[in-house]
Image (cartoon, rainbow, N blue to C red):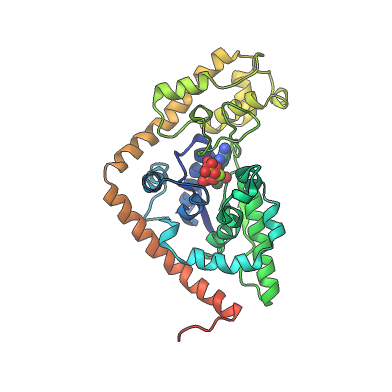
């Protein structure tokens, strides 16, 4: 039976990229009736420095973002990673299954460690093994993510295959990444070659789910573009990263194909298209940001939801971890 798992780091404000690439699609899988498990991956967030108070605040705000985007904590399991110790316990086993060379090839490691890899945390290097544990400790079959996480889900598959092979049994499923929609890779508004990220130092590079109407309009107005008007057809966007990004965002927010959008806006100047995009973004994001603000008014309730989710998550993860320990050869208490 299919089981969905996905996580988001409480490493800053949720962005439009997180919404279109992840959150919006999580609600879809839940609403199709697939058992869905969603996690605030706080242990991933600390692979780079996080101020403790900001991390607590971001974790609760992220939970509010999930709920405001349509995740129902009674239907889906919603929790934070550090409350379910089985993730880190399974991750240790995977640290011993995965190879250094696999980790060295990860583009996220290379991007986030930057030039001075010697000074990056060991956790940042091992990140994909913890992510594999997040997924496989539930025997999840499908992982909805943005394009940037495809490589990590493939590594999760490699870890499952090697574990199954090493111990001679089909214990872990071979998980499928699910990367769908018009905006699986939303780009920075300042640089069409970089993805939009929560942790980008420039707030102008992204639209936050909590931005107000004026801020959204200003960020889109100032978004980098070339001087030409939009082409008449989608093919004309190929070599125009910034224009393509704005059109893709428009398509995803309006739930149309890129061809449908081009039929509507092809040939328009950015001075005309950008306000249309800003109106659409405000229209779609304002209800989410209002609901997030409302939920943040009762932090105690958010904490109760997360604790309850963690309990349900442990109910699934604990027997799978115990079975993995047994397969590996650990002597357990009877
Ligand atoms: P950070 O900069 O801290 O890595 P992030 O914005 O990349 O933050 P993550 O928590 O790493 O967010 O990823 C959460 C989910 O959002 C993942 O499924 C990821 O693929 C998706 N995602 C992140 N950025 C984008 C983007 N620009 N476009 C589409 N999906 C994205
Ligand atoms: Mg990321």
In the displayed structure image, the side of residue 148 where residue 253 appears, left or right: left
The C terminus lies in quadrant:
bottom left
Residue 266 falls in which quadrant of the image? top right
Q: Is residue 310 above or below residue 213?
A: below
Question: For the point 47% across and 53% down, which residue is it?
Answer: 41
Q: x, y percentage for residue 30?
A: 47, 51
Question: For the point 50% across and 64% down, which residue is it?
Answer: 88
Q: x, y percentage for residue 242?
A: 63, 25
Q: x, y percentage for residue 297?
A: 27, 41
Question: Ligand 1, what quadrant?
Answer: top right
Q: Nearer the viewer, residue 25 or 169?
A: 169
Q: x, y percentage for residue 5?
A: 52, 56
Q: Nearer the viewer, residue 305 or 93?
A: 93
Question: For the point 60% across and 77% down, which residue is it?
Answer: 328
Question: For the point 61% across and 38% down, which residue is it?
Answer: 185
Q: Is residue 109 above or below residue 264?
A: below
């Amino acid at each position: 039976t299919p089981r969905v798992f996905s996580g988001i780091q409480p490493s800053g404000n949720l962005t439009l990229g997180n919404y279109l690439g992840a959150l919006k699609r999580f609600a879809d899988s839940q609403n199709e009736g697939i058992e869905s498990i969603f996690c605030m991956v706080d242990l991933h967030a600390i692979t780079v420095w996080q101020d403790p108070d900001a991390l607590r605040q971001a974790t609760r705000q992220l939970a509010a973002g999930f709920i405001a985007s349509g995740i129902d904590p009674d239907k889906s399991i919603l929790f934070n990673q550090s409350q379910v110790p089985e993730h880190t316990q399974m991750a240790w086993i995977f640290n011993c299954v995965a190879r250094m060379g696999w980790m060295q090839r990860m583009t996220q490691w290379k991007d986030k460690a930057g030039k001075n890899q010697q000074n990056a945390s060991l956790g940042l290097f091992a990140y994909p093994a913890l992510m594999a544990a997040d997924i496989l400790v539930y025997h999840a079959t499908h992982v909805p993510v943005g394009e940037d996480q495809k490589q990590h889900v493939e590594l999760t598959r490699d870890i499952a295959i090697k574990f199954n092979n090493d111990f001679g049994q089909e214990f872990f499923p071979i998980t499928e990444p699910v990367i769908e929609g018009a905006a699986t890779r939303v780009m920075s508004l300042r640089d069409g070659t970089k993805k939009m990220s929560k942790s980008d130092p420039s707030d102008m590079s992204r639209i936050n789910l909590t931005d107000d109407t004026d801020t959204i309009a200003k960020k889109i107005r100032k978004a980098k573009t070339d001087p030409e008007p939009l082409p008449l057809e989608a093919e004309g966007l190929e070599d125009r990263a910034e224009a393509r990004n704005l059109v893709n965002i428009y398509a995803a927010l309006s739930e149309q194909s890129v061809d449908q959008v081009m039929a509507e806006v092809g040939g328009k100047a950015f001075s005309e298209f950008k306000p249309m995009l800003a109106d659409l973004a405000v229209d779609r994001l304002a209800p989410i940001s209002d609901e997030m603000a409302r939920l943040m008014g009762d932090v105690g309730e958010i904490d109760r939801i997360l604790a309850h989710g963690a309990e349900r998550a442990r109910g699934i993860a604990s027997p799978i971890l115990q079975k993995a320990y047994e397969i590996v050869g650990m002597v357990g208490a009877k």
